Amino acid sequence: MAASMYIVVEGEDPGYDIFVNGRALARHEDAIEKLALRLNVKPLIEFFSADENSMALLIEEGAGNPDLLRRMPPPQWYAPADGLLTVQTLLDDLRKEPQLLGSETSIVIAELEEYETVLLKAAARGHRWHLAVSWR
């Protein structure tokens, strides 16, 4: 089963494509978290929040407990600017140190660029966001 960290934008249909791959970011989440902390920015995983839809998907995929849906707190939403600070800081550093994640650095950079694109669109429209995780 491959994990993917993807962006959820508040509301039903934001009016733009929010697809991000997020598989390489999920594979390297520990290294990306350590890098963010070294760079003094909020790690991506701290933007995670479960909402009813993503939890339902996890349960459907066999990776969650159905009892959690009844006790789940409301989702947390974040300002795009906060995510952009993390994403752009990570991008700057990974571009300067392309050996950091070995042969996967370019893939992680591409995924962070997808995050940046979505977060810029969310910021322009005043939409809040959070990260979710899928196992497929």
Image (spheres, grey):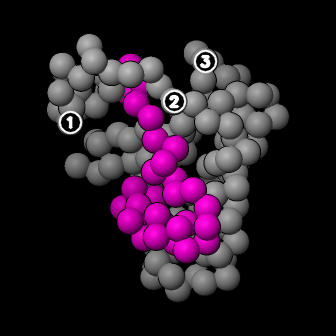
Tell me the SS state at disc 3. loop
Q: Identify which amino acid the numbered label 3 is placed on.
A: Gly
State left or right for residue 98 relative to residue 1.
right
Disc marking residue 63? 1
Can you tell which of label 1 and label 2 is closer to the viewer? Answer: 2
Does residue 90 sit above or below 17 in this rendering? below
Foreground pick, 113 / 66: 66
**Dot 3 alpha-carbon crowd within 10 angstroms: few under 14, some 14 to 19, many 20 or more:** few
Foreground pick, 21 / 11: 11
Q: Identify which amino acid the numbered label 2 is placed on.
A: Gln
**Marks 1,2: beta carbons within 8 A:** no
Q: Identify which amino acid the numbered label 1 is placed on.
A: Ala
Distance (Cα) linking label 1 and label 2: 21 Å
Disc marking residue 102? none
Position in image of residue 43 (x %, y %): 52, 57
Q: Quadrant of the C terminus?
A: top left
Disc marking residue 76? 2
Position in image of residue 28 (x %, y %): 40, 65
* Tag 3 residue: 11
Magenta span: predominant SS is: helix
Give yes or no for residue 47 being in the magenta stretch: yes
Foreground pick, 90 / 98: 90
> Which residues lie in the magenta part?
25-54
Distance (Cα) linking label 3 and label 1: 25 Å
**Dot 2 alpha-carbon crowd within 10 angstroms: few under 14, some 14 to 19, many 20 or more:** some
Position in image of residue 7 (x %, y %): 54, 39
- Within the image, what quadrant is residue 53 found in? top left
